[in-house]
Amino acid sequence: MEYIYNSCGINFRFKTNDRAIAQTIKKTLNHLDKSWINDGKVVTIELKFVRNGISGFFLPKDAKLINSFDLKINGSFINGHTYSKYNKVYLIKENVLYGSWDKWGGSCFVSSRPYVNSVECSYLIKTIFVDIITKRGFIPIHASGALVNNRGVLFVGDSGQGKSTAITYLLDKGFGFLGDGIVCLKKSTEWWIYPLSCCVALEKKKPFENFLRNCDLSQAGESNHLFNRKDKYYFNIKTCEHSLFINEAPLSLLVFPTLSNRNECRLKNISFKEISPIFSKQVSSGIGNQQANVFASIGRNVKCYELYLSKNLTGLEDELCSVI
């Protein structure tokens, strides 16, 4: 079985005898937005799913180990390693999953044994995207973005500090959406924000009910707008409130949120130097020797604030509008 997927000039070719995994990959790609990756060349990523393991793959001699990580799947951990020699080679369980590519694409091989599940495949797809866009000059960062007064606001910080909650609140107030989970930065005359995902993720369904109430579900089921995966709900902005999805915006504010017991939201001005360790921790991919110059450029051009979030986010939009 061969499956062809095309989005915004980027071609994905699947060869698989596992229809369930192919559908999972399709859903993963449909919830990414790649319209801003458009430089006239086509990136081709070939995915081959094979049964009974993978033979004939050998790690290139003298490949350099860049990173090691653990991927939690259904309560257990999968050991992963990233090596580099010419192209990057990513391994999740040796001889089960691997990919090799440069900035114009490459190929991945996935065993469809029962213990290689769809979550691992989705993780692999997202890893490829992050690696390719990094090689094309973008800086992926763990953050969420909103458009306020035609300027980009980036909420940066660890999981659980209120980034997605703040974004959902602003969406409900009619502010634009610039991505959640991972967004990308790139420098032209100034720094710009580009969304990688068109979905917001929250642990509760309730914040999205106002959007679904105004949505025509007669032609498409609710699952096209709101779907559940593991312990989170994912709300697709492009399919429900397309006008709120913003392809790009200049970066004006870096906001570092934290949950508090205040009655109203409050911003506190802070220097980029103070917040730089937190910011660098959220960068999804290393930027090498240029890191100091990149951070210095952002610090010169972007205002930084700590944000104390109130219980019901009262006053958030007023605080942001007052400083942008």
Image (spheres, helix red, strand yellow):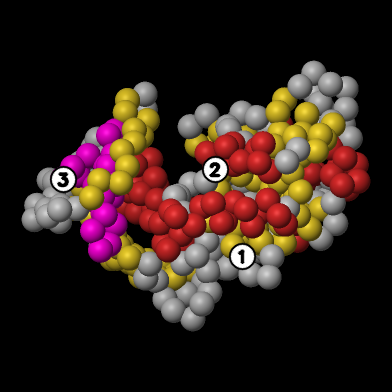
Residue on which disc 1 sits: 187
Q: Residue at x 73, y 41 (%)?
A: 271
Residue 28 lies, in percent from the top left, at 46, 51
Evaluate if marks 1 and 3 touch, with contact meaning CB atoms under 8 Å apart. no
Task: Determine the image quadrant of residue 191.
Answer: bottom right
Question: Residue tagged by mark 3?
Answer: 95
| Mark 2 / mark 1, whichever is N-terminal | 1
> Considering the numbered disc 1 on the image, is that residue within a helix, a strand or a loop?
strand
Q: Secondary structure at mark 3?
A: loop
Distance between mark 1 and mark 3 Cα atoms: 39 Å
Depth check, front residue: 257 or 78: 257
Distance between the Cα atoms at labels 2 and 1? Answer: 17 Å
Q: Residues within 10 Å of mark 2 (few under 14, many from 20)?
A: some
Indicate the amino acid at tag 2: Ser
Q: Real-space Cα distance between discs 2 and 3?
A: 33 Å
Q: Which region shows up in magenta? A: 78-100
Q: Label for residue 280?
A: 2
Residue drawn at x 64%, y 70% is 188
Give x and y (percent) for residue 53.
13, 46
Q: Nearer the viewer, mark 1 or mark 3?
A: 1
Magenta residue check for 209: no
Q: Nearer the viewer, residue 105 or 151?
A: 151
Q: Quadrant of the N terminus?
A: bottom left
Q: Which mark is residue 39?
A: none
**Image position of 301 (left or right of 30):** right
Q: Main structural element of the magenta stretch: helix, strand or loop?
A: strand
Task: Compare marks 1 and 3 and give the one earlier in the sequence.
Answer: 3
